[in-house]
Image (cartoon, coloured by chain):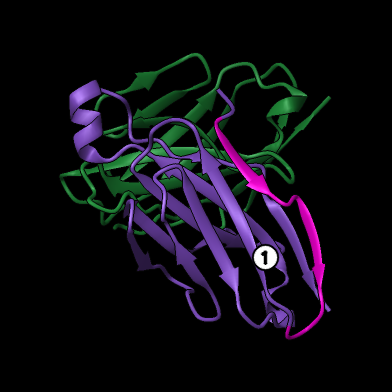
Amino acid sequence: DAKTTQPTSMDCAEGRAANLPCNHSTISGNEYVYWYRQIHSQGPQYIIHGLKNNETNEMASLIITEDRKSSTLILPHATLRDTAVYYCIVRVWSSNTGKLIFGQGTTLQVKP
Amino acid sequence: NAGVTQTPKFRVLKTGQSMTLLCAQDMNHEYMYWYRQDPGMGLRLIHYSVGEGTTAKGEVPDGYNVSRLKKQNFLLGLESAAPSQTSVYFCASSYSPLQRLAGGQYNEQFFGPGTRLTVL
C-alpha cells in the first residue's frame, strides 16, 4: 500500500470550509484514497473514499488530482464537532485482507 | 443494530496478569481487526481475521494472541501483561470483497469504542 503524507495540524474557523491535503505520490492505479477521522477518545469513523473522480457525500467532498498523486478532503462548513484527527489512507478496493495502515494524520482544530 | 462493541471499556492489570478483550459485531462482517493506539500515534494493527476460524498477524503481534471461534466475535488475549502494552485497543470489522460484490457495500471499517488498558 502506498504511503501518504499529511500536515501534522491545521486550524479552521467555524463555519468556514476546511481543506485537508494529502500527498500520495506513489499511489498505484488500483489503489483508492480513503479518509477516516477520529474524534478524541473515540474509534475512527469512515468519511469518504475515491479512485479518480471527485466524490461527495453528506459528510465531505474528496477532490483527487488528475495524476492522482494528491487529494484534498473538504468539510464545507466546519463545526466545532469536526475537531478531530483526520487520516488519509490508500489501499486497493479489493484487498483480500482489508487492512488499513494508519499514519499520524492531521489534527484539525475548528475554532469559534 | 449495535454495530461493534468492546468489552471491557477500562481495565487495570498488574504486570504478569492475563486478560481477554472481547469484540462483537452484529453486521455479518467476515473481516475483523484488532488495533492498538498509543498516545500521539496512529493506530497499529495487531492481528486480524478474514473469516471464522482464521487469524493472521498484523504489524505488532508480539505478546498477543487472538481467536475467532464465531463469526461475530474476535477475542484478543494478553497471556502475561507488560507495561508496554498499556494502550487503547480498538476493534474493527468490515465486509469481505466477496460480500461487497454481492451486496454492493463499501469496504469501510466500522470501529468499536475502544478499551483503555493500563498495565502497572
Work out whether residue B55 or residue A16 is closer to the camera in this orientation and state it.
Answer: B55
**Image coordinates for residue B64, horizontal then vertical, percent:** 53, 74
Chain holding disc 1:
B
Q: Could you tell me the amino acid type at mark 1? A: Asp
Q: Is residue B81 left or right of residue B90?
A: right
Q: At 38% across and 37% down in the image, what residue appears?
A: B29
Q: What's drawn in magenta, residue-wise? A: B3-16
Q: At 55% across and 63% down in the image, what residue appears?
A: B76
Give the quarter of the figure containing the N terminus of chain A.
bottom left
- Residue A75: name its quadrant: top right
Secondary structure state at the residue bearing disc 1 = loop
Q: At 50% across and 22% down in the image, what residue appears?
A: A60
Task: Mark 1: give few (<14), some (14-19) or many (20+) Cα within 10 Å.
Answer: some
Work out whether residue B65 or residue A71 is closer to the camera in this orientation and state it.
Answer: B65
Query: Is residue B12 in the magenta section?
Result: yes
Give the quarter of the figure containing the C terminus of chain A.
top right
Q: At 35% across and 43% down in the image, what residue appears?
A: A70
**Image coordinates for residue A66, horizontal then vertical, percent:** 23, 33
**Image coordinates for residue A24, horizontal then vertical, percent:** 34, 51
Work out whether residue A91 or residue B77 is closer to the camera in this orientation and state it.
Answer: B77
Q: Which residue is mark 1?
A: B38
Tell which chain the image draws in green: A
Figure colour of chain B: purple
Q: How many marks?
A: 1
The extreme left residue here reads A29
One can see residue B43 in this view? no
Query: Is residue A112 in the magenta section?
Result: no
Work out whether residue A1 or residue B28 is closer to the camera in this orientation and state it.
Answer: B28
One can see residue A68 in this view? yes
Above or below, A13 against B5 in this view is above
Q: Is residue A64 left or right of residue B84?
A: left
Q: Is residue A68 left or right of residue B48?
A: left
